[in-house]
Image (cartoon, rainbow, N blue to C red):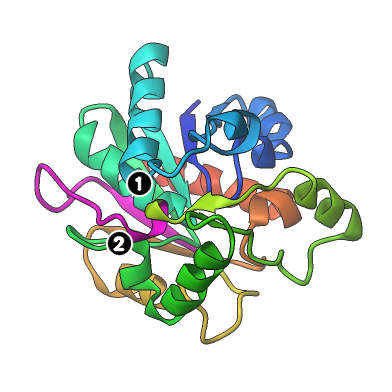
Amino acid sequence: MAATFLVCHGAWSAGWAWKKMHPLMAAAGHRLVTPTCTGLGEREHLANPSIDLETHIQDILNVIKYEDLRDIALIGHSYGGMVATGVADRARDRIRQLIYLDAFVPRDGQSLLDLNESARARMMQLAATGDGWRVPPNPTPPDTSPADVEWLSERRVDMPIKCFVTPLKLRHGELTLPRSYIYALRTPPADTFRPFAERAKSESGWGYHEIDASHSPHVTAPETLMPTLQGIVAERVG
């Protein structure tokens, strides 16, 4: 059965980073929608100190509204898990299921840096040493090919620090819609995302999947990611 996948991309990234997934999705009969959040990618010219998590949640809500998207498989990658959780909270009637791809899974009132406390001092210092409100990109995973490193490096841009410190506000209580977590096994054992993988394995209402890939499989391992995504939407149909 054909599905509509809507992506909430990661920090420093944008819709362009999902380029390799479009032909795979089309060949499988699915629709892949990859909008870019304000201040990033082709919308870099809109970057300003006021951009925060709420801005990016509203970006995706507007895509759902104006594209009239329904029955959505909503993907949140990395920071995009923060965005996707807020979107799913406010557009519950449009979301079929929520898929976290090596992503943060916040609860009400939590910011990204609340979930990644070890990075707080470094992120704040990076923003302070620049113009006071932007954080430069993290390094790419070590298994990223030289060609992809060049492609990514030319396009990734600084991230507004407010996106990392703004707490998520759930307006309708904890989410109850079907959720799945995809854990990338090539990330270091003590990595940031293991607690969310463990949560998905231990709580009811979750599907849990592992893939042999590093943190951005849509770049480094699209052929591995694609069947995993297809399997998730097929499970929810059956």
Which quadrant would residue 237 be assigned to in this image? top left
Amino acid, disc 1: Leu
Q: Is residue 28 left or right of residue 178?
A: right
Residue hosting label 1: 53
Q: Which numbered disc flags the more N-terminal residue, 2 or 1?
A: 1
Q: What secondary structure predominates along the stretch shown in magenta?
A: loop
* In front of the other: 52 or 151: 52
224 left or right of 205 in image? right
Q: Nearer the viewer, residue 134 or 14?
A: 134
Q: Residue at x 45, y 60 (%)?
A: 103
Q: Are marks 2 and 1 in contact (CB under 8 Å)?
A: yes
Identity of the residue furthest to the bottom in this view: 190
Kind of residue sitting beneath label 2: Ser
Residue 1: tell me if it is visible.
Answer: no
x, y (%) of residue 224? Answer: 68, 55
User: Where residue 77 sits in the image (x, y, percent)?
Assistant: 50, 52
Q: Residues within 10 Å of mark 1 (few under 14, many from 20)?
A: many
Q: Is residue 5 magenta?
A: no
| Residue 129: quadrant of the picture | bottom right
Q: Residue furthest right?
A: 147
Span shown in magenta = 163-182
- Residue bearing mark 2: 111
Residue 198 pos. (x, y %): 36, 76
Q: Residue 130 sits in which quadrant?
A: bottom right
* 210 w.r.t. 100: above or below: below
